[in-house]
Amino acid sequence: MIPRYGSLCSLRGIFYNEKNRDFETLTEAKHVFFFSSCRGSMMYALKALGIKKGDEVILPAFICNVVPDSLTRFGIKPVFVDVYKDPENIGNICIEKIESKVTKKTKAIIPVHLYGNPYESNKLKKLAKERDLFVIEDAAQALGAEYKGMSVGSLGDVSCFSFGFGKPMSTGGGCVATNNEDIYKKMKDVIADVKKPGFFDDIGFIISLTSRKFLMNKKIYGSTYRIWKEFGRKIESVNEMDFRGGSTLNEKLFRFQIKGFKQVLDTRRSQFKILKDSLSDINDIVLPEERNGVKHSALWFSFYHKSFMGSKRENFLERMRKFGIDIGIIYPFISPAFYNEKNTDYPCADMLSKSIMSLQMGPHLNENDINHISSALRRMLNES
Ligand SMILES: Cc1ncc(COP(=O)(O)O)c(C=O)c1O
């Protein structure tokens, strides 16, 4: 398992190959392109779909900020929509509010399976079809989740996954998955079109680290979004990319984690259920509910208390941490504010940003930990 000295940076090219298709089986996606992150994957997907400067893309106001950021790097306008606050759909894009935001410039919708809970795909797909829009699934938190018999990763025109820390698999990296043959070909073209950065590009890249709007608008720097760049390497030729982004270490971790993935998924789901059942009689908290025909990836158990907003929530979290419980906030902000939007018409996103609390499920917790979390929560909620 341990890569021999020096092989950490090598590209052995077996991170992705025809014989090893566990990931494709899990996601029901025919084609997968691995990159160094979900955000890098998303940028390639946008290019492949031909979405460019001046276009608009619709996405939830309550979202990981790297997603709208991936758009604005290309001069694409993020158009935000409020989310649901209902237990079955906490934080997922409010489909009824999308239509009024579609304009002639709109090219795509990026729905997120927030916390691992699949968004209402049938309704969204119907709307996207009627308005001729692409659906780019943000599946970063949802590997293993299912919607009406279909795997997350096969619901959009393209799907983007993250293998960063705190994700269902955390081997490093991310990927674009698609079942669409045209998009598959376009992805290959976009990858083949990546230029080796020249002297001025390098200078521009350095400047862009401090001045984000500079230069990154038009080109994709393949090297910036490939895993090996993190080890200081640059692309020398297109062949070298050849869809094989992982280092030996990433590859080993990937193979290991995908093998045990179903078991980890079952563990998380069972923890999720135990926690939910044990808290379901407490008034005023809104717990995540699984809808009929939908299977949550159970990555995050995110809930809120109807009257714990702002500092009251902070205080609650502080006290939970004193019990040794690692509890966080995903997300403590809404994204429009970062894009100088004056519009504040996102009441549910706003409410969630002030009240949501998130616990990560996974094999780092055992049965005692779950019982401890449950009794600490119960005690504190009863005391409050
Ligand atoms: C929903 C969501 N989308 C996108 C991302 C970005 O993933 P990456 O860090 O791999 O770019 C994250 C990561 O936190 C996420 O949670």
Image (cartoon, helix red, strand yellow):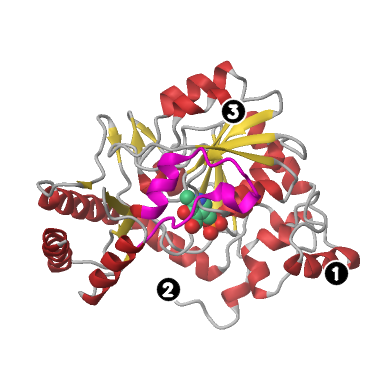
Instruction: Note whether 29 is above or below 200 in the view shown.
Output: above
Residue under the image location 79 percent in, 51 percent down: 219
The amino acid pointed to by label 3 is: Lys
- Residue that label 2 marks: 1
Nearer the N terminus, badge 2 or badge 3?
2
Q: Nearer the viewer, mark 1 or mark 2?
A: 1
- Residue that label 3 marks: 101
Residue under the image location 84 percent in, 65 percent down: 204
- Residue that label 1 marks: 203
> How busy is the neighbourhood of tag 2: few (under 14 within 10 Å), some, or many (20 plus)?
few
Residue 66 at x, y percent in the picture: 58, 54
Instruction: Note whether 254 is above or below 303 in the view shown.
Output: below
Quarter of the rendering occupied by the C terminus? bottom left
> How busy is the neighbourhood of tag 1: few (under 14 within 10 Å), some, or many (20 plus)?
few
Residue 154, disc = none
Residue 43 at x, y percent in the picture: 66, 48
Specify whether tag 2 is near ligand 1 (CB below 8 Å).
no
Q: Secondary structure at mark 2?
A: loop
- Would you say 320 lies left or right of 21 here? left
**Quarter residue 379 falls in:** bottom left
